[in-house]
Every structure is written in C-alpha cells, then in structure tokens.
Image (cartoon, coloured by chain):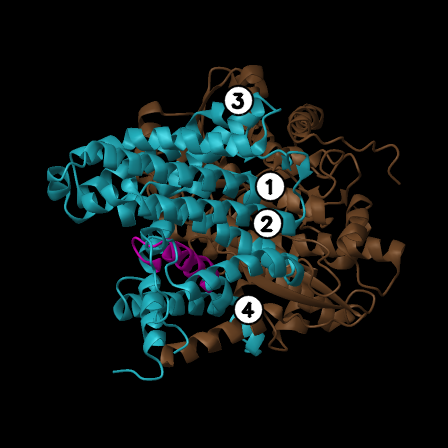
Chain colours: A cyan, B brown
Amino acid sequence: MIYREAGTFRTTYRADQAVFPIPQDKAFVLGLVAVAYLVVPFVMTDYFFLAILIPFLILALATLGLNLLVGYCGQISLGAGGFMAVGAYSAYKLVSIVPETNLVVAWLFGGVCAAGVGILFGIPSLRIKGFYLAVATLASQFFLDWMFIRITWWTNYSPSGSATAPPLDIFGWVVDRPVEKYLLALTFAVVFAVIAKNLVRGRLGRSWMATRDMDIAAEIIGIRPMGAKLSAFAISSFVCGVAGALWAFVYLGTWEPLAFDINRSFSILFMVIIGGLGSILGSFLGAAFITLLPIFLNQVPAALGLPLSTAMVSHLEFMIFGALIIFFLIVEPHGLARLWAIGKEKLRMWPFPH
Amino acid sequence: MRSWKVGTALVGAALAALGAAPASAQTEQFIPHLVYRTGPYAPNGIPFANGVADYYNLLNERDGGINGVKIVFEECETAYATDRGVECYERLKNKGNGAPYFMPLSTGITFALMEKGTADKIPIVTMGYGRSETAAGAFFPYVFPIVGTYWTAADIALKYIGQKEGGIEKLKGKKISLVYHDSPYGREPITLLQARAKDYGYTFDALPVTHPGVEQKATWLQIRRNRPDWVLLWGWGVMNSTAIKEAAAVGYPRDKMIGVWWSGAEPDVEPAGEGAKGYNALMLQHGAGQYAVHRDILKYVYDKGKGAGEKDKVGEVLYNRGLVNAMFSIEALRVAQEKFGKGKPINGEQMQWGLEHLNVTAERIRELGFEGMIGPLKLSCQDHEGAQIGRIHQWDGKKWNIISDFIEADRQYIHKMYEETAKKYAAEKGIQPRDCSKVS
C-alpha cells in the first residue's frame, strides 16, 4: 500500500539500473540525508555530536570500507584497525613534515598509504582462503600495532608514544565547533557511501561478488582473481585509512596506538556482520548498533530512576548487549540490513498479506 | 509488526534517556567522577572510586556540603577505555551548573581529555599520573598533575636506589630495567630514565608488557638472563600481581624491585601471596592506614549505611589516594568559592583559578584530618605539580611498612625537562604559553 512498485514503469535501461529503482526508496534516503544536513545541526546538543554522532559516522565509514572487502569480495579480514592506524599515522606524519598540507589531502594521503599496505597484506589472499586468510590479516594487525608503538619516528619521538593532531583547518575553515566536526564527518560518510554504492554496482563490484560467490567460476568467466582481490583490498583499506585519519584527527585529537588495537578490528568486523554482509546500508546500521547501543543501555537505568550502582549498570549493559547480539543473529543471520529489506517487503504487501 | 513496536519503544526510551538532564538548584555543586568498577583494572579502580565517593559523602553528611553547597556527584563507568572515558566526559561536562573538574584516573583518558578540557575550560586533575610535562602550567592551563608526575616518581626511585647502593655515584655500571605497561602510562618514565642513564652511567633497559599484562613470561625470562641490579615496575591492575608472581617464579629478588605508586597497593601484592614478601613500591607520600579523617568517615558515612564500599577496606592504599585526591580538589574549590562567591557552585573556569591559587598548609591538613598522610601542597601558574616528594614502603606479607624517609626529586632538573617537552608540544599545536607574571 504505502510502499509499492506498481505504477513505476521503467522504460529505459538507465532507469532500471538507477541506484534507487523505487521512488519511495529514493525519497527516503534523500530525505534522510537532508535531515542530517539541515535539521540535525540545529536541534542536537554538543553531547550528541561529540559522543554519539561523530564516532558513529566515522566508524560507519570504517565499516563500509571493511564491508567492501568482507561482504562484497568475501575475503575475511581482521586487520581493519591496523589499516585505520596506517591512515591516521601517515596523515599525521605528512602534516608534521609538510605543515602547509591541506588536511583533506593529508587524510586522503593516509588512505592511499593504507591502500598500499592493504595490497601488501592482501597478497596472501591469492593463495589462501577463509579462516587461513583471517589469520594472515591478523598478523598484519599485530605487525602494524607493533610498528606504531616501537618505531618512535611515527610519533615524532613523543615520550609517551602518543600523537597529537594539529588544529583542523580546511581551506581556511577552522573546524572546532562540535557541529562543524559533525558536518565534516557526515560529508565524508555520505561521499564515500555514494562512491561505494556505485563501485559495487559496476564492473569492479560485480567481479568482487563473483569472486566471493565462487572464485573458480569467476576465473572461468574471465575475472582475474588477482585484480579482483587486490583491488578489493586496496579500496577497502583506502576507506579504512581515511576513516582512521578522521578518527584520530576529528574525534580523538590525541591518540595512541591503543586506539587502533585488535579490539577495534574485531568491533568493526562485528559491525559488518551484525549490519549485514554486502550491504552499504548495513554498514551504517551495524555501526549504530555496536557503538550506540552500549552507550544507550548505560544511561537507561539512570533515566528510569533506578538506583543501581555504577558497576551493576555496567554489568547489565554487557549482559543485555550480548543477549541482543545473539538475538539478532538468531532472528536474522544476514544482519540488520536484511531485516530492513524484509520490512520493506512487508510494507509492499500491507495491508493485504498473503 | 511486533519488532516495530519494540523498535519504537527503544527509540523513545533512547531519546528520553539522552535528553534528560535534571535541573540543579543554586545550592548544589555537581561533580562528575569517571570510575572503573568493571574490567581488568577494577580491583584498583574500585578502592579509589570508593575513597572519592566517601569523601564527598562525608562533606555532605558532616558539614552539609562546601560552605552550605551540597555536593551532587555522578559516577560514569569507563572500564579504563579511552573512548568510553571521552563519552563520559561529554555526557557530564555540562550537567548541573557545569562540571568544575574531572579526575579520569587513567593516563590514556587524560591524554584524550587534555585538549577538550582546555577548550571547554574544565580542569583535568590528575594526581600522581597523566602527562608529565603538563606540570608546566604556563603551557597547560587546564591540566593539573598535582602531587607528583611520573618523571618525579622515576627520579625518586633512582635516588632511593642511590641510597641503597651507598651514593648516587655508585649507580655507574649498574643495570636497571623497567618493566612497563605498554601504554602512555607505562612509557612516561622512559624519557627521564634514559636521560638520567647518561648522567649517572647506569645501563637502562625498557621491557614492555602488553595490556592487560597477564602474559609476562618472556619479559621475566629476559630479566633472568640479564640479571639487572634493580627492576622498576610501572604496572597497573592485574599486571602488578602477575609481575610479582613471575619475579618469584624466575627467582628475581623482590626486594630489588621498586613499583611506582600505582603498583604498590593491596590488590597488587595480595594475589601473589608469599611471593610478594619484600617487594617495594613508591608512595605518593601517603600509604595505607587510618587517620583522623577515617574516623569521621566511619562515623558519619559508614555508620549511617552510606559507605561506598566495605568497612574493613577503609584505609587501603588506593582508598586513601581517592580521599587525598578528592580533598585537594575540594580545597581548590573552596579557594575558588572564596574568590567567586561563598556558598555558590563553581564552574570549570573558576575552579582553574582556585587550583592555581591552592595552598594547603600543614595546619590546614591537620584541620582536615589528613595529618601524617600527606604534606603541604602549593600550586601556581608556573607549577601545576606542587610537591615532588615520596617515600618507599615494603610489603611484609601482611601489611605495608614504610622503610625510607621522604626523598625529594631533583626539582630543577625535572622542571627543565618539563619546559623543554612542553615547548615542543606548544610548537606542534601552535599554542602560545601564558605569561605567568601577568596572570593574577
């Protein structure tokens, strides 16, 4: 009723291949972006921007990057945190060596460095698959962690091994207010989401998906596994690297290698799995679930006026969060994005289900 | 449909939870407190958090607050994780009339909050931890590593070793190893220990231990092979007791080990049992034990059933540190009240003035019931550290015994290092230091 395809006739291939073939979808997503740009900056408090929306957007970007690799190309990677670190530290080094560099250039440079490292650590994927590849990428995580802690050149020989970002000055626009930081993070997330959506619809994305579904068959129909896999590693790491640079420069300000440790990699992989493998929307849903739900759960008892001790609240948070992860994985193993799709199917039938 | 309802309910509750910020009266002072009562560092985080909470409750119950301003404090659990600490900071910084100060009890969180606190004009009080060069107050107006930094701690440890060896010049040719928590916290003392190695002529070796520190076999095998004359331990939480157990396992003499003041509390030695006998640790002036203030706490807080922890834990090392930390912060708040209006809540900017004009004399310490625990403390715009003394205590299997006099760190030497490092930081961030002669 509300949501239907009846009446939308596509007369050209172009219309059939549009990003959003259904007009309601298009209106919804454009409306969401419009709200994010035009309404949210005026109604939200600084707490929302700094503690909730900015980390969510940046981690969603990292999840998007990893989703390209894991969800679309089927190469399991546990190295997302390491690639984020490469992005953050190379951007930092570039800015400290050439202080005139525009920060956007520095972040993209961080992404390019991460892409290079990603290709390097993606080479084993040409020979090994599945869990074995996961172990190989785990090695990259540990190596990169080690490198940024031990080689003090990366942190300009800072005594405590931490790096500090310079003030955010982009084309003369000094980003220091929370809402400006939010708009910056939002812009990056939106631009990369559009790029990713178009990548996966194109030749490259199709070659990734073919490799994921059956690599031998893909090779037989003329897809080069090396090109497909390494390009997936490169582009995924690029996005992760940019996300890492944003995480360091925009969100943390001062950071240490611990910000990109193995737990970061795991949590991003979980965001991909919970959100939905091979889904752009799922990346955002997964990031929202993993980053926002614990913060929300932590505040519920106080909001309800329950006199629980701090430790108890924290334990409850863990238990409920864990239970919800299990619940969602049982209800819908294909992730939140699939739930969303089912919801849309149902809306199409409503109010006359079969 | 059902999942929809759940979803709507969740979103509704989320908005309610996040939007709710209770209004506070003019006569209430909101104080946030970042704690960790869960996670790998909880055994150390809990007594500290209890000490702070009990001191605030004591002031409310005994004195009716600070000059009649009741303290309303809220704990926020960080689990020692930097990102959660930042979230807690953002959540609480504007609550009530605005947070007067934050005490993160984590060097990692301190690093993340330093700039935020400076931008929001909220002091970050890091008693005995944090970033050492922040003691140079001209460069870091809103960070207060009061009572001692890690460079001070390392210097005191070296001086003590000098005493034991029969003169600081005897350090020449000795081997000193540092076993440290591989985080900004553990890495802090390395700079000073390396610089001092050149002056005194000892060989210095830094051995990292990965968070959370339960796996140290390789580190201690290295120590067994190298046989350093002294081992300094910069651990936290479960890492400390593990290190002591491993030292016992490889037969490294515990009385040649010196822990920093975060590696010298009951939860660090008790799990190691007999193996911890003879282990030394620095004291942030105070040790364990009960003093006049504890009697009041037992009377006004615990006897009324308002204690944050268990009665028999009152007076543990980290509990006392929580007390001292809360006491100094509150004293600075009183100073700020004197200037900006007695009986009124204080905001971060006013608190910063209070901290820089804090002068807790020996007499005041007696009045507060802290005599014997802590010495006087005087801060200024130049000096955000105030005191640079410490003692050593030793665990005899049952309790901590104080085995040294007060040792003072080399003030001039360390302040020069603060200045140099702070200048580097300021250059990188483009900060102009304040001119302290012009600050009133």
Chain ID at mark 4: B
Mark 4 vs 1, N-terminal side? 1
Q: Which stretch did the figure color magenta?
A: A275-293
The residues tagged by marks 4 and 3 sit, at their Cα atoms, a distance apart of 43 Å
Nearer to us: label 2 or label 1: 2
Q: Does the magenta stretch include residue A292?
A: yes
Q: Nearer the viewer, residue B435 or B220?
A: B435
The residues tagged by marks 4 and 1 sit, at their Cα atoms, a distance apart of 30 Å
Nearer to us: label 2 or label 3: 2
The quarter of the picture where the C terminus of chain A appears is bottom left
Nearer to us: label 4 or label 3: 3
SS assignment at label 2? helix
Mark 1 vs 3, N-terminal side? 1
Residue at the disc numbered 4: B311
SS assignment at label 1? loop
Chain ID at mark 1: B
Residue at the disc numbered 1: B130
Q: Position of residue B84 (x, y in %)?
A: 52, 54
SS assignment at label 3? helix
Q: Position of residue B207 (x, y in %)?
A: 41, 30
Query: Can you say whether B438 is above or below B11 in the image?
Result: above
Q: In this view, does A267 lie to the left or right of A124?
A: right
Determine if residue B168 is in view.
yes
Q: Where is residue B133 in the image (x, y as percent from the top left)?
A: 65, 32
Chain ID at mark 3: B
Q: Is residue B219 magenta?
A: no
Q: Which of A211 and A308 is in front in this view?
A: A211
Residue at the disc numbered 3: B194
- Respond whether the residues carrying marks 2 and 4 are from the same subunit: no
SS assignment at label 4? helix
The residues tagged by marks 2 and 1 sit, at their Cα atoms, a distance apart of 32 Å
